[in-house]
Image (spheres, rainbow, N blue to C red):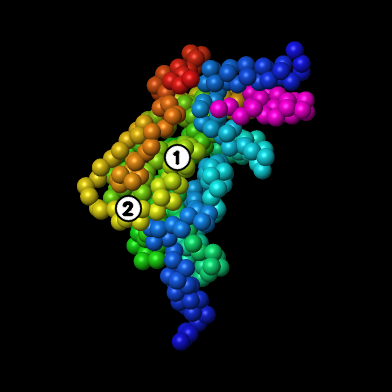
């Protein structure tokens, strides 16, 4: 099997894995459809923006949860923001943690919030690594003379 | 004729010009690009909506808040940041939950404006709250879409607007069409065409009671 076919096989398997395990959902596929010659780096750009946002929000939430008196409304608004942006890029696991996180905020459950925050952090790291792997595979395909397959 | 200061004069000039140019009064010539004003406080969402619109061959202006949108349209009483000839918006798409001014408040201001009230306004929101949806539709929103917004949503909206039906929607009692429970509108002309994409389950129930289990996500599509 030539290199290109091998790489295509790898990326197909890897994408299937990401979907199956719920790391990404259909919205991510939607984003991939928005790439074209004029904007080949679109997905990478949006995803990078997302992770920047994510890190900032996680830090803010951590600070808020460390306070003597926790401002749960504040935390909730950060969670809301993260919930929205994770949904927009198809980061399904993160989005789902945010749903539970919101409940903890509403219940003013500090321990629950801390656990959710840890989970968010964990999922962000995992997703970042996974997407990096995906993007690397795409780069290899391009380097091997192929074009990024857009999922139909 | 131009009594008073330059800002006032500018506003008079701008208003008469926009009337002349014909800021979207429900009809669309079809030979021009649709110019969409998108409003969202999230920069991830701004990036996505901008791309969705550009790839659908729309001219896009994206702003981060309701007040910026009003500024752009020249509805804030200040001098518009845009040149006179450019102020032709065919569609406004706005997020609902924004700090400062919500999408609903922005919608109201637009519908109160004699110059801009004919411009269709689409509300986007991650929340499926029926009272909120009712309120927006009653206030004159063209559609209320549950985020995340998809390419098929943009294509559909574009078709509706470029269809140029121009007919006034009667303010009937609110009739909701829930297409996959994420798109709501009043008028039959906004009817969602049957889409080939399967139902989008954006709140997968296995995860609604979050646990840290490694249960695989149940796929409702593919």
Q: Is residue B82 above or below residue B176?
A: below
Viewed as shown, does residue B58 lie left or right of B91?
right
The spot of residue B54 in percent (x, y) is: 56, 47
Q: Secondary structure at mark 1?
A: helix
Q: Which residues are magenta?
A: A129-152
- Given residues B199 and B100, the one toward you in this image is B199
The circle drawn on residue A56 is: none
Q: Can residue A145 be found in the magenta stretch?
A: yes
The spot of residue B185 in percent (x, y) is: 33, 44
Specify the subunit that label 1 lies on: B
Which numbered disc, 1 or 2, marks the residue that appears first in the sequence? 2
Q: Which residue is mark 1?
A: B153
Q: Is residue B140 above or below residue B209?
A: below
Viewed as shown, does residue B167 lie left or right of A40?
left
The spot of residue B91 in percent (x, y) is: 45, 53
Quadrant location of the C terminus of chain A in the rendered image: top right
- Residue shown at 48% from the left, 55% from the top: B30
In three-dimensional space, the C-alpha distance between marks 1 and 2, rounded to whole angstroms, equals: 19 Å
């Amino acid at each position: 099997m030539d290199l290109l076919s091998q790489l295509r096989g790898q990326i197909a398997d890897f994408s299937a894995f990401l979907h199956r395990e719920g790391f990404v959902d259909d919205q991510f596929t939607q984003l991939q459809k928005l790439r074209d010659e004029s904007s080949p780096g679109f997905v990478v750009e949006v995803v990078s923006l997302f992770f920047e946002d994510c890190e900032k929000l996680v830090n803010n939430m951590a600070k808020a949860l460390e306070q003597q008196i926790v401002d749960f409304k504040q935390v909730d608004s950060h969670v809301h923001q993260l919930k929205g942006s994770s949904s927009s890029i198809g980061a399904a696991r993160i989005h789902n943690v945010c749903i539970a996180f919101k409940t903890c905020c509403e219940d003013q459950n500090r321990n629950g919030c801390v656990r959710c925050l840890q989970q968010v952090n964990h999922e962000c790291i995992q997703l970042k690594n996974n997407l990096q792997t995906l993007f690397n595979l795409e780069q290899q395909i391009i380097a091997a003379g192929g074009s990024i397959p857009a999922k139909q | 004729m131009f009594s008073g200061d330059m800002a006032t004069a500018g506003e008079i000039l701008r208003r008469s010009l926009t009337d002349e140019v014909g800021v979207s009064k429900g009809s669309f010539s079809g030979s021009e690009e649709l110019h969409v004003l998108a409003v969202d406080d999230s920069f991830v969402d701004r990036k996505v909506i901008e791309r969705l619109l550009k790839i659908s061959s729309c001219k896009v202006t994206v702003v981060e808040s309701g007040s910026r949108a009003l500024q752009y349209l020249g509805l804030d009483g200040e001098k518009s940041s845009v040149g006179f000839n450019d102020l032709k918006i065919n569609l406004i798409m706005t997020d609902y939950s924004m700090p400062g001014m919500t999408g609903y408040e922005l919608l109201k201001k637009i519908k109160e404006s004699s110059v801009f009230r004919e411009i269709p306004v689409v509300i986007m929101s991650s929340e499926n709250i029926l009272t909120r949806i009712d309120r927006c539709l009653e206030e004159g929103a063209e559609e209320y879409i549950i985020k995340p917004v998809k390419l098929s949503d943009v294509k559909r909206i574009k078709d509706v607007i470029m269809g140029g039906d121009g007919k006034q929607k009667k303010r009937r009692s609110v009739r909701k069409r829930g297409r996959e429970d994420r798109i709501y509108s009043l008028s039959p002309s906004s009817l969602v065409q049957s889409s080939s994409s399967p139902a989008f389950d954006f709140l997968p129930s296995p995860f609604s009671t979050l646990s840290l289990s490694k249960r695989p996500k149940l796929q409702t599509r593919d």
